[in-house]
Image (spheres, grey):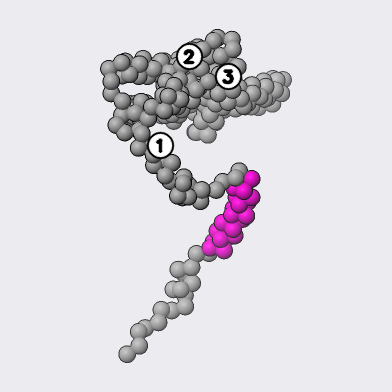
Amino acid sequence: MSAARPPEGANAALRDPLARRRLGALLLALVVLWPMLVIAEFKPQALLAPGTLRVMGGFLAGFLPPALSADFLGLLAHATLQTLAMATAGTALAFVLAVPLAFAAARSLSISRIGPGPGRWRGQAMRTAVRGVLTVLRAIPELVWALLLVRAFGLGPGAGVLALAITYGGMLGKVYSEILESGDTRPARALLETGSGRLAALCYGLLPGAAQELASYTVYRWECAVRASVVMGFVGAGGLGQLMDQSMKMLNGGEACSILIVFLLLVLMADALSALLRKWLA
């Protein structure tokens, strides 16, 4: 007895109507990505070469056991506090710089956009200028700023704090303004249309709906600042990065392993802080 064949309409219903379009997009992505991988000299097969595996195995074996001597743990605690201080101070200064710039750049707080008036073009020009400043601030990586500022401040975390403040100020300002524009702007617009000031429209019209996202992104940037502080330590900005650089130059894998464990704990702490803030703001 032969099995019943499904009707032709059922097979047609199971087909993906966008399958060809998705396949074409995938092929186009591969065509674009392949030359980029060639230009970047990306050769993953080199990782599987016998000589490479032997060298990597010997290098990783030197990371165990982690260094736990009292003298090194004292240095590690001081470097950790220095990294946290650098990241926190840099993010705080970036926040102070970003808030007024985001306030000026946000179109949702523009009174001149309510209707035609003599200040319409002036407001547009000011927002364009502020967005240009934000672009300049975030265009130069914090590592480059640290290299330049180390010459002025000397070795230590001072250069790292200012480097983070400049670059992250531009990043926070841009994202803050976009968050304030992407949410529900009707309450703020209603306040502005009834004659309310921009600050009141921000506090009562935009912040209640955007507070969670703003806080989450700020904590995420602080987490990025911790990682950036470690990297800047390699150019003389102090903290865990400088201690890691010294350990790697001395080929002390145990010390490097302990530093990596502390770094992982810092990232987990940032994740927990972000979740706590989102829960509190909810």
What is the number of the mark on residue 157?
Answer: 2
| Residue 33 belongs to magenta span | yes
Pick the residue in front: 242 or 111. Answer: 242
The residue where tag 1 is placed is 59
Label 1 secondary element:
helix
- Which segment did they paint magenta? 18-39
Pick the residue in front: 200 or 250. Answer: 250
Asked if residue 57 shows in the view, the reply is: yes
Q: Position of residue 63 (x, y in %)?
A: 35, 33
Mark before the other along the chain sequence, 2 or 1:
1
Image quadrant in which the C terminus is located: top left
Q: CA distance from mark 3 to mark 1?
A: 29 Å
Task: Tell me what residue is drawn at x 56 percent, y 61 percent.
Answer: 23
The answer to whether residue 21 is above or below residue 81 is: below
- Residue type at mark 1 is Phe
The answer to whether residue 16 is above or below residue 204 is: below
Q: Residues within 10 Å of mark 3 (few under 14, many from 20)?
A: some
Image quadrant in which the N terminus is located: bottom left
What is the number of the mark on residue 147?
Answer: 3
Q: Quadrant of residue 227?
A: top left
- Residue type at mark 3 is Leu
What is the number of the mark on residue 23?
Answer: none
- Residue type at mark 2 is Pro
Asked if residue 196 shows in the view, the reply is: no
Label 2 secondary element:
helix
